[in-house]
Amino acid sequence: MNFTLKSRFNLLVILFCFPMILGSCKNSKKEPEAINYFSAADEIIQSIKIPTFLDNNFNIIDFGAVADGETNNTEAIKKAIDSCSDVGGGKVIIPSGNFLTGPIHLKSNVNLYVEEGAMVLFSTNKTDYLPVVHTSYEGQELMNYSPLIYAYKQKNIAITGKGVFNGQASNTNWWPWCGKETYGYLPNTPKQADDHNLPRLWEMSENNTPISERIFGDGHQLRPSFFEPFECENILLQGVTFTNAPFWVIHPIKSNYLRVDGITVKSHGPNNDGCDPEYSKNIHINNCVFDTGDDCIAIKSGRNNDGRVVNIPSENIVVENCDMKDGHGGVVMGSEISAGVRNVYVRNCKMDSPELERAIRIKTNTLRGGFVENVFVKNIMVGQVKEAVLKINTYYGTYANQEGHFIPSIKNIHLEDINVENGGKYGVLIKGRPENFVKNVTLTNVHIKGAKTPLSIENCEPIIFKNTTINGTKY
């Protein structure tokens, strides 16, 4: 009898309390807080310290430089840099005027300051870029013509000012070697695709030929990069303008802690990518203008066997407040990507030109392989693109057979707060591989107008759409 009364009492308590417990559970349940992925970007930026220099000034005029646009000032600039380095560093000044020079080789603790009104004209004499140096061409290391501005294994270096670097590449200098008549190539003249050039380098890469034996330069047709810090650390590039580049414009390779701030790249030659970090990390590209003949920014990590041997992913790269005009792509990952790319942050940029082909692009194939993961794009205004706002292509190829045994991995690609006025042929174009689908692509607050085909998707996990419209249709 007592047990029955207690049981009834407990039952009444449960029935009385259950609605309150349930209500309490409902009230305590909160929507998950939005993850601020860009807090990691802020940490990357803070980790990149601005180089500091001693208060020593070395004007190249004092070392015999002549601002007539005709006198070769290579030795005068070299003497100024050497003298600056010998006293522990400082500033080497190129004053207003037109200065012709061969390659400039920077040293640790030197700030090359190019005054407003200064024009640095690089020699059109190929022999000025010899002897060959340790460099890279399309993701494969070799001994080749010196980059126009080169730093090898240096620390705490800078190029600053408001002057102009003019590579003087044209349809009669450097560019014809690409092999396209558009850039001055004449039939039956040497080009980079000839057997003694790229095919020879590809074979050396596959055979693991030592870099010291991969000798090109004189008698070969592989163009030099414009500015290449190779295995450098703590680099500042600020304010200057680059134009008429032979090949890639800004090419940090195997370098760490780079700040690119307020520079302008206006160069429409073949392979004139604006900035190509390769095997590099902790990079901040801010407040720049890219008006290029190829990709505005292309993040890379080696080609094929070379990339897999080096095995240094490019990572921790922040791009913000930039203006992308002409170019094959605004921010691109690939195609030389065999060691992989991760942790790329793009925000507060404008991309707009009838000649801009894609806004965000990932390109690779099964010879390249590699991976791309953790790409975050936020607050981008796209006026016009030709082909697609987002393009992911795992079948990319510009040469012959591009099929191999290295299946790419692409995942965690997030676009947020993107507004597009004219989306071109496709809103989103993805071609993954059946062996390994593209994974975890999200579009949040993305609004695309004017795309002829809203979506073209192959071998990709379902895209997650949140408050996204294409041509006025909600997805």
Image (cartoon, rainbow, N blue to C red):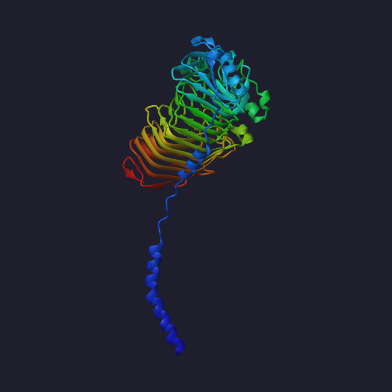
Residue 103 seen in the figure: yes
User: How far across and down, in percent of the image, does residue 194 sit?
Assistant: 58, 19
Q: Which of 48 and 148 is in front in this view?
A: 48
* Rendered residue at 44%/31% (across/down): 329
- View extreme (front): residue: 55
Rendered view: 129 above or below 24: above
Locate residue 25 relative to residue 73 in the image: left or right: left
User: How far across and down, in percent of the image, does residue 240 sit?
Assistant: 46, 24
User: How far across and down, in percent of the image, does residue 186 sit?
Assistant: 51, 13
Locate residue 23 relative to residue 52 in the image: left or right: left
Count the labels in the image: 0
* Rendered residue at 62%/32% (across/down): 306
| Image quarter of residue 427 | top left
Residue 187 seen in the figure: no
| Image quarter of residue 205 | top right
Locate residue 240 relative to residue 453 in the image: left or right: right
Q: Which of 163 and 267 is in front in this view?
A: 163
